[in-house]
Amino acid sequence: MQPKQIRNGITFTLLSILYPLYLFTTKDPDSVSTTSLGLALFLPIVGTIFALNIPEPKMKWTLAAINLVIFILFLYYTLALR
């Protein structure tokens, strides 16, 4: 069961990094839709939940911290954009 939890935590952490990075670097800030912004904020939350399910404490807190930093960064960017 543990490899599946680790894989899910890492996968959603990568998604929470790559999707907003793609979204905010390839599109004009005025053309980004509200749905895309919502998804960019939703992925780090889900990544944090999956990261907290990892049994290894060091990896758990590292991935959770990365996801929370990404969430705060893109929340600030979203509020500044809208």
Image (spheres, rainbow, N blue to C red):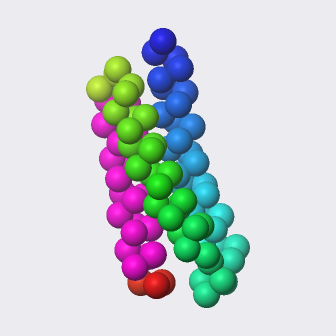
- Check the image and name the residue furthest to the front: 35
- Front-most of 42 and 63? 42
Q: Tell me how many marks there are.
A: 0
- Give the main secondary structure, helix, strand or loop, of the magenta stretch: helix
Q: Position of residue 72 (x, y in %)?
A: 35, 64
Q: Position of residue 66 (x, y in %)?
A: 39, 49
Relative to 5, residue 62 above or below: below
Identify which residue is drawn at 66% across, 83% down. Answer: 31
Identify which residue is drawn at 61% across, 87% down. Answer: 30
Left or right side of 53 for 4: right
- Front-most of 18 and 39? 39
Q: Position of residue 8 (x, y in %)?
A: 53, 31
- Check the image and name the residue furthest to the top: 1
Decide whether residue 24 is among the magenta residues. Answer: no
Identify which residue is drawn at 62% across, 77% down. Answer: 32
Relative to 3, residue 29 above or below: below
Instruction: Give the extent of the magenta segment.
Output: 58-79
- Check the image and name the residue furthest to the right: 26
Left or right side of 56 for 78: right
Decide whether residue 64 is among the magenta residues. Answer: yes
Left or right side of 52 for 25: right
- Check the image and name the residue furthest to the bottom: 30
Left or right side of 31 for 4: left
Q: Position of residue 52 (x, y in %)?
A: 34, 33
Identify which residue is drawn at 44% across, 67% down. Answer: 74
